[in-house]
Amino acid sequence: MEIKRAACVPLLVQDPYTSVWSGSDAAAEGDTIHWSGKKQRIFVSVCIGDREYRLVGGSGCDREAGEGEETRCKAMRQVLTDVTALSTSLEYESGEASVKLVFTTPLLAQDLTLLSRPCSYIDAQLWVKEKADLTEKPYLKVTVTPDLVSSEADAELIFPAGTTKEGRFISMGRADQHPLGGSGDNVTIDWGYVYLAAAGRDCRLYTENNGRGITAEIPFETEDGEEPRTSAHLVFACDDLLSVNYFGQWRRAYWTSVYPDILAAIDDAMRTREETLQRTAQLDRLIEEKAAEAIGPDYVYLCDLAYRQTIAAHKLVTDEEGNLLFLSKENDSNGCIGTVDVSYPSVPLFLWLNPELVKAMLRPVFFFADTGAWTFDFAPHDVGRYPYAWGQVYGLNKKPYGQSCYWTSRDGAVYPPFYQYRGEDDLYDLTFQMPVEECGNMLIMTAAVCLAEKDAAFAVPYTGLLTGWKDYLLKYGADPSGQLCTDDFAGHLSHNTNLAVKAVMGIEAYSQICRLAGKKKEAEEAHRQAEAMASSWEKRAAAGGHTSLVFNRPDTWSLKYNMVWDLLFDSHLFTPQIIQDDIRYDLAMANPYGTPLDNRADYTKSDWILWVAAMSRDREERQQLISGVAAYLRETPSRFPFSDWYDTKSGAYCHFKGRSVQGGIFMPILADLWRKGI
């Protein structure tokens, strides 16, 4: 979709570590960044005769003019930015030429090999005007800096180069390799190798003399098509060597089960380039068509900006038995891996395109919850801190031990393997757990994936855990005590009506699982329990034309995003009029950049606004609800990847960027498909 502006534009976005974005209105105005805001610089230019035109990166030409001299590397004027789910196209104009530069990462949710393969395409087309100097063949120049393999500016680097079956490559990495050498939140990679590869034998691949990276110079060649054009093609790849430690297992990325090494993966990327780009274009069209049908252009814009970000905040691996694991990184929050209440908002995208990925999110949580290290009768919050799935780190109890002698939360440090500690009842501080939240999340996500497949087979091995979590919600969910929910930044809250909705839907989720498993009696009993709880909820949450944030407090209100599952489960627990009244109230409370999360502050969560929009069957209402989110993404002064927590009056980012929760943007599409029985 052609866009005028976005908070941040995805370029080379593959996983939590390899994530290159442009936070400028024009890509040549500033250095490219990692989702965290740290520099991950790449530079792209076109060279025509003795002129070099900068396309991406604020200081990318190493032959800048001296004082008093005319610069030899000017930024070419960017005239168009087009972002789809899988590609970003940038178009440029000068007096000598027109250029189209395209970055594509084929993160196809339906194709796990392509989703996992760490290869992106950089493609350029050049149209030279008559007055251009063509004594030398024009070429595309791409430079990748050490930022993509090292967080230390003075690290010693090596630059292996060679040939493959399809072409040539040059690579770069630290001389001292320590894969998975640390963990943390706003951190970048400090190991692995980055590659530039091209099929053309006359390309130039070299190391920058000043040690700032590797460069590929790819001549533009004439290609046949509807009209003659000159094009240049390049593959960008990253090999992280090891991806995660999964409860003591050192696991490599899923693609390594398909290819013997990174060079074979790069070769296949080059060999299948045309076919792969056709498939990415097909998915781009599908997403834009469904978004346009559901709401309109603003929604297309949101889906296009959310897709790559959502998938690239995960890493796909398998365990030793070959089971898929899709592990998220809780970006710009605390760096947790496999966070339950981060997976929960993300699942609409994956329930639509590939439910296997939802199963792969849930497996690590079930595994940890069934270890002796997790001693509670409610579901855990996470399974570690990325890239170490070593047991929950959220809400650790520091008082008995002292942080210095037992663990550290410092970025770069690795928490101890908590999954090994059996029966340590004082390991976690109960004050900072999310019992109702996570029980509801796990039950709802499990039921949703079973409904997507019309089969309870996935849930059956976890019956004991699921039953225990359902019982916990029955006991404590109707009127939750002062505890945290997924919106933990808002603090502890007693009598949280939206959290109680989650408890209702968690119990109903259990009913849905039982029904699919052929357990009719258990299904009916759980459904009756959910009905009774919902009926009581409506009386206690009534606030005169809307429902409250806190039970029996009609002066409060909040977005009731958890109620969307009543529609998706077709369970009819809540009165349709209550849902409609709340939506109208949400519209009335909207600010320029959307409706606040609740009455306590002006900030909101973009994913939850989209869940509310999914509950409306009125296209105009939906558009009104999401228009503020689209305005935020276009106008915010905060130049980070799509934040889900921002101020609805100023449009300023509060926290959270580049997170997988933006898979929740796809909830209206999912809701429409499920309503149609698709």
Image (cartoon, rainbow, N blue to C red):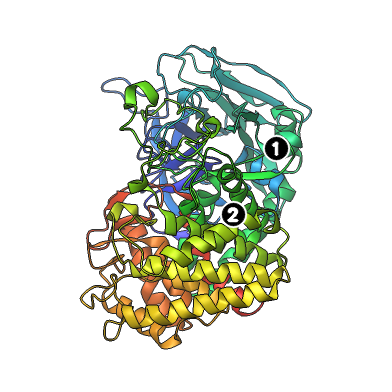
Residue 540 drawn above or below residue 663: below
Q: CA distance from mark 1 to mark 2?
A: 32 Å
Amino acid identity at mark 1? Trp
Expressed as whole percent of the image width and height from the top left, the position of residue 104 reads 59, 46
Q: Which residue is mark 2?
A: 465
Quarter occupied by the C terminus:
bottom right
User: Would you place residue 355 above or below residue 573 in this image?
Assistant: above
Q: Which mark is drawn over residue 255?
A: 1
| Crowd rating for badge 2 (residues with CA inside 10 Å; few <14, some 14–19, many 20+) | many
**Residue 370, quarter of picture:** top right
In percent of width and height, residue 171 lies at 60, 22
State left or right for residue 152 relative to residue 551: right
Q: How many marks?
A: 2
Vertical placement of residue 633 versus 558, above or below: above
Q: Can residue 130 be seen?
A: no
User: What is the crowding at mark 1: few (fewer than 14 residues within 10 Å), some, or many (at least 20)?
Assistant: many
Q: Residue at x 38, y 71 (%)?
A: 560
Image x and y of residue 106, in percent:
63, 47
Say which residue appears at 70% left-offset and 58% top-offset: 460
At 28% across and 54% down in the image, what residue appears?
A: 491
Q: Tell me the element at label 2.
A: helix
Q: Residue furthest right?
A: 165
